[in-house]
Image: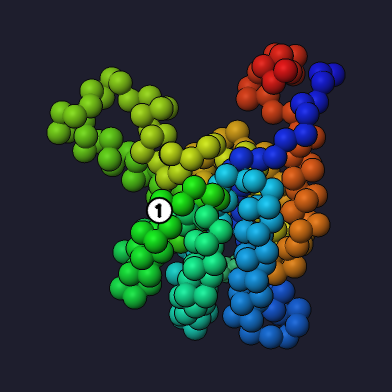
Amino acid sequence: MSVIPPASTPRHVAIIMDGNGRWAEQRRRPRLVGHRAGARAVRDTIEFCIDRGVEALTLFAFSSENWGRPQEEVSGLMRLFLSVLDREVDELARRGARIRFIGEAQAFSPDIQKRMQATEALTAANTGLTLVIAANYGGRQDIATAARQLATEARDGRIDPATIDETAFGDRMALADLPAVDLCIRTGGDLRISNFLLWQLAYAELWFTPTLWPDMDAATLQAAFDDFSRRQRRFGLTGAQASRQQA
Ligand code: FPP
């Protein structure tokens, strides 16, 4: 068995924040109460990542499939996003965070779109944690967008189709300018990716916990980071080769 690499902190962490609804149902409260509690867990998680020197944190806040939820839940979530943006952005900016959004923003109300753009502009020059909020995001949609862009460039003669490779494709996907996702955490007990970062998770370490998202805390995040530091990442090589590369 090859040597396990030394403890390391993930540079880029992505999280599927699941379990808000069940957390509320367990308390016989409306689902929105769970989302509100989830927003507190978001704040604690950002804090944790800043303290650990994580470079990028990508949070799955709203999938392209979530529009199908009851109207009351969707509009409540939208109001929650707005109030979180209003409340937290200044403090995050003060702490050096750069905030970005991925996903199809045009589906959101003009008000939310304006706040998203203002947030990105306000924090664009910051050099601390890059916080990416995936909102109306879908992994397949991301891949289709990159394919459409490549096709357009080829049609316009800006690229030669023969040169289209993984790098050309990856360069046109969300998060292309950030370090690769090292660790993907999913709370809430389900063992699936749910159309999150399909391309970008190719070599990410996956970590699942039954903890419902509103109960996410520093101890659980630390358990995920500790587990990550014990994994041997082989990237398709043999254990011996990977150990030599990491030495
Ligand atoms: C999934 O839980 C969670 C969501 C669809 C929304 C996530 C939103 C937040 C954590 C609130 C604030 C976030 C930001 C970035 C400001 P679920 O409702 O699917 O839970 P269930 O599986 O128990 O029903």
Instruction: Give percent across and percent down for residue 102.
Output: 42, 54
Rendered position, 110 above or below 50: below
Query: Could you tell me which residue is drawn at 79 percent across and 42 percent down?
Result: 227
Q: Is residue 202 left or right of residue 157?
A: right
User: Number of callouts in the render?
Assistant: 1
Query: Could you tell me which residue is drawn at 76 percent across and 78 percent down?
Result: 26
* Front position in the image: 135 or 226: 226
The quadrant of the rendering that contains the N terminus is: top right
* Front position in the image: 124 or 5: 124
One can see residue 152 in this view: yes
Query: Could you tell me which residue is drawn at 63 percent across and 25 percent down?
Result: 235
Dot 1 surroundings within 10 Å: few (below 14), some, or many (20 or more)? some
Q: Is the CB of mark 1 within 8 Å of ligand 1? A: no
* Front position in the image: 222 or 105: 222
* Front position in the image: 98 or 70: 98
Q: Quadrant of ligand 1?
A: bottom right
Instruction: Give percent across and percent down for residue 8.
Output: 72, 35
Q: Residue furthest right?
A: 1
The amino acid marked with disc number 1 is: Ala
Instruction: Give percent across and percent down for residue 52.
Output: 69, 48
Query: Could you tell me which residue is drawn at 51 percent across and 43 percent down?
Result: 198
Q: Residue furthest front?
A: 94
Q: Is residue 146 left or right of residue 246?
A: left
Residue on which the image places disc 1: 124
